[in-house]
Image: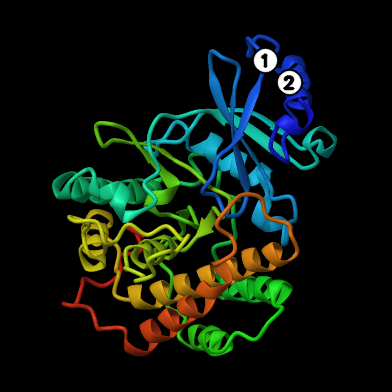
Amino acid sequence: MGADHPPGLDPLRLRELLDRERPELLGGPLTVRLIEGGRSNLTYDVGDGHSRWVVRRPPLGHVLATAHDMRREHRVISALRPTPVPVPRTVLLCEDETVLGAPFYVMEHMPGTPYRTAGQLARLGPARTRAVLLGLVDTLVDLHAVDPQAVGLGDFGRPEGFLDRQLRRWGKQLAASRSRDLPGVDELQAALARALPHSPAPAVVHGDYRLDNVLIDEDDTLTAVLDWEMSTLGDPLTDLGLLVMYSTPLGLPHSPISTTAAAPGHPDPAELVERYAERSGRDVSAVGWYTAFAWFKLAVILEGIHYRYTLGQTVGAGFDHIGSLVPVFIEHGLTTLRGRPAPAAPRTPRDPQKG
């Protein structure tokens, strides 16, 4: 096929591996298509004319190896398969970089739509949109209710000191990708460090939980949670903070960043937080800190993508404007930390048994 296939996945090499490892899996010749929308690990739709699968691999130019760990992503999806959390069935993990030039894994293709824009979501109408977003929160509660030990993920992370390490990790990632002046980013990082909240009991954390990273089928059921590249064992409220951030309208008409917050019927962040609190039993009074941390984390991720773009190491469209978004995210983080409102009402003190 040569140049007929997208960069990063040679279907002939993949076919050779699958024929050797899973000899009865494939029918006809493989076709490969890069799935647009991802901004970090590369995702491909692979078919043989009868069935379809998905292949995930790191970007062609990588930053921190820990941000693109295929073994961890494959492990968490496999572990969550028997739980109420909907995930694809994994087919194969390959860590031999001679096959595709990087480690990768293959999983089943799941039905459903990843809603990336308010316009896409608006077609459902307000009532269905509201139900989809509340269902997104309910699935997050299901994820955080999974007992890590029971599914073999008891050593999937180091929860002690999780938030401090997260701040340090993203600070290091920022330093590794920093090629320009970013006013306010050091102030935001320092302010977050000064106000670290007390973490609840640890849970399996997705790390990038949003509507864009799940599939919704035609009857509005959430069929799969995808993109587990940042998953770990840690503070579950970091996922909630991200969801709040992604539920805040950015007011940027041509943003390549997924936000559906402007769709009619989309619950506001306060309602999503309250639903999570009621269903999980967790104290969410520090959600402002977690939301500000989400703005910081996304600013660092975007800066890393912008850096790879300047080096010509990205694949796909929509990367040229990402650099201009980074200051917007930094400012949102600072504003959230400076003026985060107090909880509407005092909640019950944290119950360690509930996490």
- Which image quarter: residue 66? bottom right
Which one is in front, 322 or 135?
322
Separation of disc 2 and disc 1 at Cα? 8 Å
Q: Secondary structure at mark 2?
A: helix
The quarter in which the N terminus is drawn is: top right
Q: Tell me residue 146's x, y (percent).
A: 41, 45
- Give the amino acid at mark 1: Pro
Q: Are marks 2 and 1 in contact (CB under 8 Å)?
A: yes
Which one is in front, 120 or 238?
120
Location of residue 53 with respect to 175 vertically, above or below: above
> Can residue 216 be seen from the camera position used here?
yes
Determine the residue located farthest toward the right in the rendered image: 98
Which one is in front, 193 or 94?
94
Residue 198 shown left or right of residue 167 in the figure: left
- Which image quarter: residue 346? bottom left
Q: Tell me residue 3's x, y (percent).
A: 76, 33
> Can residue 136 be seen from the camera position used here?
no
- Give the amino acid at mark 2: Arg
Nearest-to-viewer mark from 2 and 1: 1
Residue 22 shown left or right of residue 293 in the figure: right
Which one is in front, 86 or 235?
86
Question: Which residue does the numbered mark 2 point to in the structure image?
Answer: 15
Q: Tell me residue 20's x, y (percent).
A: 77, 16
Q: Which mark is residue 29?
A: 1
